[in-house]
Amino acid sequence: MSATSPVLEANGLVKKYGQVVALNGTDFELLPGEILAIIGDNGAGKSTLIKALSGALQPDEGEIRLNGVAVNFRSPRDARKAGIETVYQDLAVAPALDIASNIFLGRETRRRGPLGRLLRLLDKRGMRREAARHFEELGIGVQSIGQPVENLSGGQRQGVAVARAATWARRLVIMDEPTAALGVKETRQVLDLILRVRERGLPVILISHDMPHVFELADRIHIMRLGRRVAVVTPKTHTMPEAVAIMTGATPSELDQALTKKGSDE
Amino acid sequence: MSFQSVRRVLAAPTVGPLLALVLTVVFFSLKTDRFFQAQNFSLVLQQVLIVAVLAIGQTLVILTAGIDLSVGTVMALGQVVMTKLAVESGVPALPALLIGILTCVGFGVLNGGLVTGMRLPPFIVTLGTLNIAFALTHTISNDLTFTGLPKLELFWGRTFTINGTDFTYGIVLMLLLYAVAWYGLNQTAWGRHVYAVGDNREAARLTGINTNRVLLSVYTLAGLTYGIAAWLLVGRTEVGDPNAGQTTENLDSITAVVLGGTSLFGGRGTIIGTLIGALIVGVFRNGLTLIGVQVIYQYLVTGVLVILAVSVDQLAHRRRA
C-alpha cells in the first residue's frame, strides 16, 4: 500500500459553523483506480467533507493534497480545473438542452479558424461526435445524441451527468448520492456506469446511504462519525452490520464483540 | 416525407406560432379587402417594428426565466435623452444619440446588477426601474416634445421602394438585429449558457458557467435593444415624445415573446418565434383597426391573447413536469 501514493488526500480538516463542528479534524485518502465509498450517519460530516474536496466550501483548518501537491480550492470551478468532477444526486442537467450540449455545457468547443475565433461559431457537429463516442465507450444507449435530455429516463439523465463527469475528469470523480433520486432499474444502470468509470482508470469517491450498493461497488469504505474518519474498512474484511456498528458508534464492548466475532470467523 | 419527419416538422417550436400567424392573416384577408395589400403589409411592419425590437431584449430576459417590465419606459427615457441633448443642449447628433442609447444600456446594467447582485426577483426590480425611468423621462423632458431633430436620429425612418411599396430602413435594421440575436443564441456558447441558466440555473452553475455574468450580459444587451428601439422610434415619429412607450409596449413585447412560443418558465423558446409573435400582435392590431374595431377593444383582444398564450405555456410545463 505504501508504494501507491494517494491521488487525493486530506489531513486534519476542520469546518465549524458557529457552535456546530461539521468536520473535527478528519483525514481522507483516495488511492489510484479505486472506488472509495464514504458512509456515515446524517450529520457525520460526509457532505461537508465532500464539499471541501470539491471546492464547494473551504475548510477552516487542515490540508488537501492532490497528487501530493497542496491545493486550495476556492470554488468548484477551481476543483474542476484541477481535474475533479462531481456528480450530484439531483440530476444537475439542463433538461431542455440536448445531450451533447449538456456534456459540453460550459466547455463548448468552437470551429477552427476565423469562424470560431472571430465569430465564436460553435462546432456543433464535432461536439456531437465526441459526446456520442463517450456514450458508446461508457455503454450508455440512447437513440440520438441530439435529443433533449428531458426525453430521457431518470437513469439515462444521470447517465448524462456521469458521462459528463467521466469525460472531463482527469484525476477523479466524486459522486454524491448519484442514485438517490432513481428507481431500482435505473439505479442498476448507474451502478454499472460507475464500475465502467473505474475501468477507465478514474478513481471514484462514492457517497451513498445504500449499504448493499456500497458493499458491492467499493474497494474501500471510509467511515465517518462525528466529523472524523473513524475507520477505513473493505468489503472483504468487514460485514455490513460491522460497518454500520462502527458508523453508528456502537459502544466499545459492542464493537469488540463484532470484531471478535469477525476474528473467530476467519 | 415519412410519418416521422412530418411529426418532427410539426413538433418544431415555431410551427404553432407560424400557423397562428397564417390563420390571423387569412381571417383578416377574408374580412376586409384592404388587408391583403403590399402597402398595408409595409404599414404592419412599421407598426410592429418597435415592439419587435423591444421583444428581442424581452426574449433574452424571459429565456433566463426572468421578465422585464421596464422595456417601454426605458425606451421612452432613451429617446427623450437623445432628442433633448441634440435639440436643446446643443450636443452634436452622434454623441447625443450614443448617450441616449447608453442610458438604456445603463438601465439594463442596473436591472441585471440588482437581479444578480442583490438576488432580487426580476419582476420587482423591473417594476421599480419602470417607475424610475418613467419619472426621469418626465422630469428631463419637462413634459415637452422635442422636434427639429438631426438627420442622424431620423435615419431609420427613411424609406426605399420595392415594386412601388415603401419600406423604412428601420425594417432592415430590425431584421438584422433578429439575425444577430439568432446567431448569438443558436451558434455561440453564450447562447447555450443563456438557455442553460433559464432551464436549470443551479445545474448551469455547477457545470462551471458564471451564471451571474450570463444574467448581467442578458439584461445589458436587453437595455441595448431598448436603446436601439428608442432610435427607431424617433426615426418613425420624428419627435422625442415623453409619452411614448408607456401604453402598450410592455405588454405587447411580452405578448410577442409568449405568442412566439417562448416559455415564461425559462430555457425554452426561439428568437424567430418572437418575430412571428410580434407579427401576430401587429397583424391583430392592424386588422382590428381595418375592420373598424375601436382601440379600446384592441386592448381587450391583446389581453385575452396573452393570457391564452401563457395558459398554453403553463399546460405544456405541467405535462413536462
Image (tube, rainbow, N blue to C red):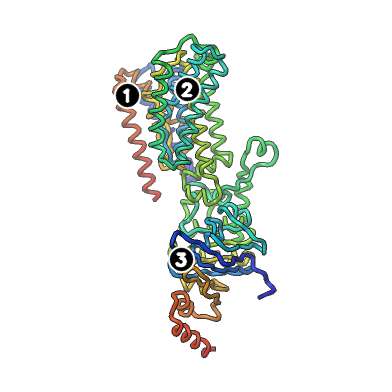
Query: Can residue B232 be seen from the camera position used here?
Result: yes
Asked if residue B246 lies left or right of residue B185, the reply is left
Q: Residue at x 55, y 46 (%)?
A: B209
Residue B25 seen in render = no
Identify the residue at horizontal 34%, vertical 28% (top origin).
Answer: B302
> What amino acid is at disc 1?
Gln
Residue that label 1 marks? B298
On the image, numbered disc 2 is attached to which residue? B78
Q: Which dot, 3 or 2, sits closer to the camera?
A: 2
- Helix, strand or loop under label 3: helix
Give the structural element (helix, strand or loop) at label 1. Answer: helix
Nearer to the camera, B87 or B288 = B87
Q: Amino acid at mark 2?
A: Gly
Q: Residue A202, position in %: x, y? A: 62, 64
| Residue A185: numbered disc | 3
Residue B186 or residue B39, whichever sits in front? B186
User: Measuring 55% from the left and 72% from the top, which residue is drawn there?
Assistant: A218
Residue at the top extreme, as displayed: B148
Q: Amino acid at mark 3?
A: Lys
Gap in Å between the C-alphas at discs 3 and 2? 59 Å
Pointer 2 or 1: first along the chain: 2
* Farthest front residue in view: A19
- x%, y% of residue B189? 58, 42
